Image (cartoon, coloured by chain):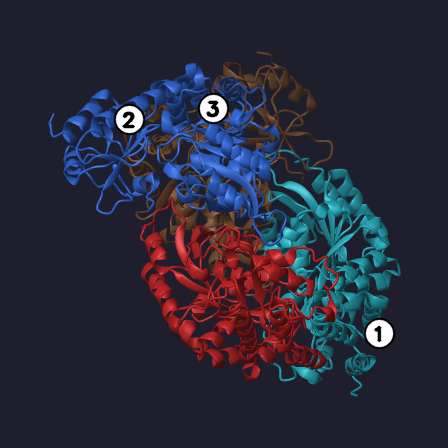
Chain colours: A brown, B blue, C cyan, D red
Amino acid sequence: MNLQSDIAMDARPDTSAATHGDDNTLDFRSDNTAGAHPAILEAVVDAYRTGPLSSYGDDPLTARVVQRLRTAFGHETLLAYPVATGTAANALALSCLTPPWGVIYCHPAAHVQVDEAGAPELFSGGAKLQPVDGPAGKIDPDALAAVLAQDVKGVVHHPQPAAISITQATECGASYTPDEVRALSALARRHGLALHMDGARLGNALAHLGCTPASVTWQAGVDVLSFGATKNGALGAEAVVFFDPARAAEFEFRRKRGGHLFSKMRLLSAQLDAYLENDLWLANARHANDMAARLEAGLSPLNSVRLLYPRQANELFVALPDAIAERLRAAGAKFYPWPSDRPGEHAWRFVTSFATTPAQVARVLAVAGGRDA
Amino acid sequence: MNLQSDIAMDARPDTSAATHGDDNTLDFRSDNTAGAHPAILEAVVDAYRTGPLSSYGDDPLTARVVQRLRTAFGHETLLAYPVATGTAANALALSCLTPPWGVIYCHPAAHVQVDEAGAPELFSGGAKLQPVDGPAGKIDPDALAAVLAQDVKGVVHHPQPAAISITQATECGASYTPDEVRALSALARRHGLALHMDGARLGNALAHLGCTPASVTWQAGVDVLSFGATKNGALGAEAVVFFDPARAAEFEFRRKRGGHLFSKMRLLSAQLDAYLENDLWLANARHANDMAARLEAGLSPLNSVRLLYPRQANELFVALPDAIAERLRAAGAKFYPWPSDRPGEHAWRFVTSFATTPAQVARVLAVAGGRDA
Amino acid sequence: MNLQSDIAMDARPDTSAATHGDDNTLDFRSDNTAGAHPAILEAVVDAYRTGPLSSYGDDPLTARVVQRLRTAFGHETLLAYPVATGTAANALALSCLTPPWGVIYCHPAAHVQVDEAGAPELFSGGAKLQPVDGPAGKIDPDALAAVLAQDVKGVVHHPQPAAISITQATECGASYTPDEVRALSALARRHGLALHMDGARLGNALAHLGCTPASVTWQAGVDVLSFGATKNGALGAEAVVFFDPARAAEFEFRRKRGGHLFSKMRLLSAQLDAYLENDLWLANARHANDMAARLEAGLSPLNSVRLLYPRQANELFVALPDAIAERLRAAGAKFYPWPSDRPGEHAWRFVTSFATTPAQVARVLAVAGGRDA
Amino acid sequence: MNLQSDIAMDARPDTSAATHGDDNTLDFRSDNTAGAHPAILEAVVDAYRTGPLSSYGDDPLTARVVQRLRTAFGHETLLAYPVATGTAANALALSCLTPPWGVIYCHPAAHVQVDEAGAPELFSGGAKLQPVDGPAGKIDPDALAAVLAQDVKGVVHHPQPAAISITQATECGASYTPDEVRALSALARRHGLALHMDGARLGNALAHLGCTPASVTWQAGVDVLSFGATKNGALGAEAVVFFDPARAAEFEFRRKRGGHLFSKMRLLSAQLDAYLENDLWLANARHANDMAARLEAGLSPLNSVRLLYPRQANELFVALPDAIAERLRAAGAKFYPWPSDRPGEHAWRFVTSFATTPAQVARVLAVAGGRDA
């Protein structure tokens, strides 16, 4: 399978006329093309109107974010550190879990492997990412068990197994169930590895699974979580959450050293605070998932339309006949190609967000169905 | 001289009661404790209300920032890249200017040397920062010339001279004149080095010097500039500006790899756009300098008050009698200690910002002068 | 397939009685358990009896090594640099071929991937090794072409394809033909990648192929070669050979920075000089191959003995019935296990060297055949 | 003071006719231009004639080296690891003592600072070397105490003090007394730092001090020692000695990852074994010191000859009138320039070794004294 990541696709210059501003009513390229949820925007404004505030996170807003996360995850001693990007969250988290000569097991399609331009390697001092495949972006525990059985622990010639990194929901839009996470954390425990979860779309996974945040993270054995907000309504904010406080010992030095310690931390904390308040994040995610579900419901019955993976979050990966794809583009819809396993088949990715409206979805379905709106 | 950086001081937990919110009317700890200028805040809000926008900087707002910088610096081909923190700006800029075995010459008090927890070393792959001293935070060109005369170029045993990094205005609140910058860039040219300027407080230096941005940067030989906005009214934004586009060849990979490429780039670009519009940045800086000048005018005549360095930006470094310092603290003023060369003398740093009001300054002077307000 | 490298096996403490000195007449664990060829030992002694010699490679012995390599490879402008270990040769070579955010394609069983404890990552500043599979340790060009077709060039999110590294002879004892190398170098050219060859056992491959050193290296498109001597009669020496001098620009700094520049360079150069003189290296390799061929001829006809890969160098990978393996061990033979694809089958690796004698081989065959000698 | 290191000088191409072989009877450029002591050469030959031997250090020769070091240093639990170069020994040792964001304090003239092309930075992942000056290459404990008093421990903005590295004997040919080492180790303990000693010329320091190896190393607070043999009669060998075994936990991975784990470890161990046997190392060092003492005795009474530093090992740093320097060069003597503090004065460095003969010294003195031999 040829991998084309969403980030890569986002990075290509967009030369179409209808790129910017309100013309982009049918933008399904990514959940990071959306703006920000008004409540989060408002929180940022408020935070900057309060006048002076201690820098670098020593402020009550940041403290409140930690408390909200403790409540959301039902974990009284977790530690959480705001950073601005998902790549920074992942790379900094992983750097705390591996020696420079360590190995981090991840899916071949994982963001950390494909879309971070070597950030995990940089921040860890050279750790090796070793891909272990599985369906729909999920690591197959049997495949991983086979790799781990190679018994290289303590042999100085070999990079040393150190951590497993999974993405929830995966880059292919699937969600690990708590049992699936537990299968991997059991392997991790057996082999003395840490378990990291890239939760860029965690909210979307939870909205699909209907389980608590705790049940699919620390209760299922996750040690460190990249808690994503940027794709789900924030302006640009993430938090690195350590369920095992001991693993956080070096984090603050690594964050500062990486240039990721904000002096005006309130910029990040205000976003996270509003993101968590009243479970806005879960509402945003549910909405995005609902919009994706509608898309799925409307597209999948059409002739020659095939889902590549089960839709379990806010992303839909569909093979479409060229005629449908062309009609959609002609109508101004934006969406990216996705590799298909089947020769001759063209597949596409549609991503919804908190900002996707039912009207936008309806229009896509109308156009796809050949019923011009 | 014992160095105590402002960042270090900011990082100490603030346990005083009057830490947060509107109670901090006399907060002179740093220019990053202030909020953000309303125009910049408003620009961020507007940017997020426009609906979808291409990610990663491929948007007109970011393009406009580059154009504004070209206009502000009178340089038609400069390249500029938004990042979120000063440490990231400096470390990423320097990483483009040195091989991993290179040497970067800087002042012993330089932010890159003291306050970045090894970020330049991380991003450059191990380059060595070599301090060269001088008064008031400015590198002494004769001292630098002596070091560079050591002729280690091309000798494989030695780390290779690669770049000079100066801070404008310096960490001691002084400003390099264009001639002073030229003296250092002449040395740089002679020895094949690049010249980097950490412009975290560039606006304040320009407000003092009264010269154009171009005259003290690229026209004086600066190759790459960390253009700071966070300390001067933004929420959290900086730009790395390459006056020599060739030196920027690797920047975008390094930025992404460092986790510093924002998907919702508008968060940074909106700030920089408003920061540059109508020269807001220069107005903010002039205001901050004026407030500092008033502080200077009011404090320096008092008995036993001594300026450690000439005030040439928005920072005042004064030795105060303990009685004055205590009165100020009792009145709720916040300011940090600064090392003094003279035994028995206690010195302090006062930093003003765009948000400092004449009333706040007046109160400080009244308290300092023993006239309780 | 579970990979067990030879190095890993060597690293396990050898607790058998007959480990050391002359008792090890049946030691087929590796070609680095052998001593050194007398001519090479003598050359080292001579080199140290000449009295003072300029340090760091500025001596005629080192110059002569470069000249001998130019003659051996029929390449008048190659540059060559002695280092002491194969890991250093590979990691330093690769560090010259990739940016820190680069990707190096190699076989999953490659020494650089499995047995260097992250050395390529360290020396390159974080480049990613991406495994591409193929039979008997050879990269399958079609699999590599598929990976390279992913078109990530210039997209900042992705680690950038930079180099291909092949091992000749492979870790599974096979030899790439010149055509096979050309197939990979054609891919490299098409995609702008460099081609590196790990020639730890190059002599053995040449002895098998019967072709010239040039024909399977630079004439087939190899840019940089780790020219191995340690496994083939030297005490401890390798050379990094750049067929494209331009690629060597940074090598000497990287070598020194890696602690791999010997002050008494003659220690390495004397070995390489004698190794190349009168084609001793090819004679040593031919001998080792012959001994392996005899082993193959004697073992393969036995019942239930199966070669895992074609023997094309000095290593034999055989599945043996347990009874044979036990008899061999009881007779004091040393050899390492090797993973077999077939359940229930136990396989082993036998490595011969310049020091393996026909008598040793004959004894092994006698014992294996049940004819106690 | 302009620093010109000996290594840099060694690296300049030697274009004089009498460079090589037995013509170099008056070669005082460095102690690494000498050959090797016959006993050590013989030991290497013997080691390679014993036939097969387990690789990677799992052999009795290596075990014996560790035992000899334990005896020599009177320390029953030290751990020791052979490596091939002094740069590797230093950089690997330091990498075990500092986090990537750490600070290592060393003298401005220290080999680790000036002559390792960034190796400590590479192996540590970016630690910062911070020079602290003092006379004759020795760190001034008061200057160091002042730096350490800056109290940056635990403040995330600052690189974290981690280790002190001293060279014994220093790069200026002086020797720390046990009390002087203790003064620095006391500082180290107080501030939680490790103390590393670069003992490239340890034997020469001991020969001067007349104290036991233990008294000026671990008994004086040294944690890790780079035990040098290359400059004192070996072909190319050093050992990293950990007096505190706990600090060695990562060493073997770091050594392998650095490409410094020799498969045919006997090459290094044989040298170290013979180097330590019957205290050959101390005899070699005493001899070298004696030769330097004779040089000192003969040169210092001459007019306008001034020692730059007290001679306390095997190096003599003298200011000579140009006429004397020219006479010496004309007679074929080789020696390097050294920076002098005094304007107009030209100074030179003379290094003796185990191989320097009384006749060579006598000839130099004759020529210097104007009495042509």
Residue carrying label 1: C294
Q: Nearer the viewer, residue A229 or D347?
A: D347
Quarter of the image with the C terminus of chain A in it: top right
Q: CA distance from mark 1 to mark 2?
A: 89 Å
Q: Secondary structure at mark 1?
A: helix
Q: Nearer the viewer, residue B41 or A303?
A: B41
Q: Position of residue B119 (x, y in %)?
A: 46, 43
Q: Which mark is residue B292?
A: 2
Judge the density around disc 3: few (<14), some (14-19), many (≥20) Cα neighbours within 10 Å. Answer: many
Question: From what the image shows, is residue B48 above or below residue C171?
Answer: above
Q: CA distance from mark 3 to mark 1?
A: 72 Å
Question: From what the image shows, is residue C25 above or below residue D112?
Answer: below
Q: CA distance from mark 2 to mark 3?
A: 29 Å
Q: Quadrant of residue C83?
A: bottom right
Q: Position of residue D32 (x, y in %)?
A: 62, 67
Q: Secondary structure at mark 3?
A: helix
In the rendered image, is residue A214 in sight? yes
Quarter of the image with the N terminus of chain A in it: top right
Chain identity of mark 3:
B
Question: Left or right of C200: which side holds A127?
Answer: left
Q: Which mark is residue B269?
A: 3
